[in-house]
Image (cartoon, grey):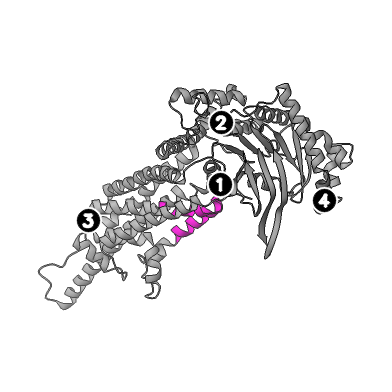
Amino acid sequence: MLQLDEISFHINQDGGTKALLDKVTLQIPAGHFMAIVGPSGCGKTTLLKTIAGINPESEGAIYYDGRNLAEEGDLEPHEIGYVPQFSIAYDELTVDESIEAAARLRVRTKNAQELDTLLDRVLHETGLTEIADRPVSVLSGGQKRRLGLAMELVSSPKLLLADEVTSGLDPRSEREIVHLLHDLSRQEGRTVISVTHSLAHLELYDSLLVLHEGRVAYHGPPSGVTHYFSVDDTEEVYPTLAQRDSEGWKSSWDKHRARYQAKLDEKRAGLIEKGELQLPPDEVEEEDETRPIRKSPGFFAQFATLLGRRWRIFSRDRAQIILQFALIVGFPILVALFSPRANEQGKRLSSSLSENAIEEMTQRAEVRESQLKVGSANSGIIMFQVVLLCLMGSNNAAREVAAERRIVEKEKFGGLSPAAYLAAKAAYLAVLVLVQSLWMGFFVEYFWKFRGDFTTHLGFLVLVNAAMTSICLGISAQAKSAEQASLLSIYLVGFQLPLSGAVLALPAAVEPLTRPFISAYWAWSGSISALSTETYSAIKGVTETTLSPERVCLFLLASHLLIGLVVAFLGLNRPKWEH
């Protein structure tokens, strides 16, 4: 049984607190199908999230099967299923692939056969067998709702919460979804609670909870709602609610609660007697091999599932493939266009200088000018590579977490390890970083020979791309939206060139404050330090910026990489549900 005892939920607003839920008390037995209805803003979704543990109750207590969830811990991922208003599937995947990924992330199966049996059962229960190979992107609204339910049923939850799963559907699809939820509530004593704005198909629910301004206005049989509110039709309930304040409705309900609870108990007893309600199996059967496996998959199993899914999504995203190809091919070509000037050899002073002082001064001036051009060209081409790789890193990761944040939160709710998610993202991005950086280095090297230790230069190209990718991944994990993450990442790249000091030396007062955070500087400086003595001297002649040793540059770029991953991990661990 699920029991809510004087549950309240407050938020901070305008310097004070506002109660979105106020002393909600309910008893919902196993195998019960309940609808939560009420006008917009009455607290329906808030109550559902509070039951789920997403919103921590401000007051009161929630009990499930006799245990206090606040004191003894929230429900285990396998005990509860939560279907949000938004889609929890990726458009690039098929129905079958979406359900399989959900199963692999939530359920530990013994072998492939057991997994196939589980998938077949869920597809059959939700009526999706015929469209199992269909991409999610082409599904209708009703089919997407069924898919959302199917992805929750893989763990056979005893408590299933559905938030507005019938909204926006045509009448036929809405009725089919309500029938499906009703049937699910009759299996294994599963409790199903559905938030809905619609007052259609009420006869399919065991009870109806009407909320008004966060308070209970009615909880009883759907057949009794018109009598209780003294209306002729259920469509008149909402206008009637507006005629009194929530305190008035709560006081009225407190007087009649016991009578309507007795009606619910009587109805439940009748269903059990007729055999229409399947009670939960005894706990002694827990070791029965026919019962669903409850253990969550381990780190490596989730990592492999997430990484495989990410590459599958990438392989089917034509726009992303074209963009990556354009960046990987186009950016090195841009750099190579400047290679002729960088390939020029600086003039040297002749061993036999002219005896004419004017001619000697002219020769020295020409040599100096030549060396400045060579130094400037080599410095510029290195910085061009570095900045373009920073831009690639930003493109790699800016939207990687933020764009799928809602799905991430839903999967975390189902038992996903944030560490496994981050590891899968890092592995996927590492491949992009290596391909982009190595191709940039080798392609440009064909046109412009790096006069020094090319391996070290290549290492700095990889590191700066990895560092910027990691930092932008951290931004993406912390950002409120994909648009915000993209904007912040673009700004970050935009500041790399002017604050690096490669073009103009920074003021002495600014340089120590900004330089530690500029990845482009450390990659540029590290690569220049790996140049031959002659080229290094030529570059020193054209810049007033202090060049740092290779070890320092390596340490700072590695620090940026690590900091980005830490920030991403912290962002992934912090809940970001939309209230």
Please indicate whether residue 323 sits to the left or right of residue 443 in the image.
Answer: right
**Circle 4 sits in a helix, a strand or a loop, which is it?**
helix
Task: Name the mark nearer the viewer: 3 or 1.
Answer: 1
Residue position marked by numbered label 1 in the rendering: 72
Q: Residue 248 carries which label?
A: none
Residue position marked by numbered label 3 in the rendering: 451
Q: Hey, what amino acid is under mark 1?
A: Glu
Tell me which residue sits at (58%, 22%) in the image. 129
Measure how far apart labels 3 and 1 are at the Cα level: 66 Å
Instruction: Locate residue 364, reporting x and y percent.
Output: 20, 71
Tell me which residue sits at (59%, 21%) in the image. 130
Residue numbers of the magenta segment: 469-494
Closest to the observer: 487 or 405?
405
Earlier residue among tags 1 and 4: 1
Instruction: Locate residue 52, reporting x and y percent.
Output: 61, 44
Most common SS among magenta residues: helix
Measure how far apart labels 1 and 2 are at the Cα level: 19 Å
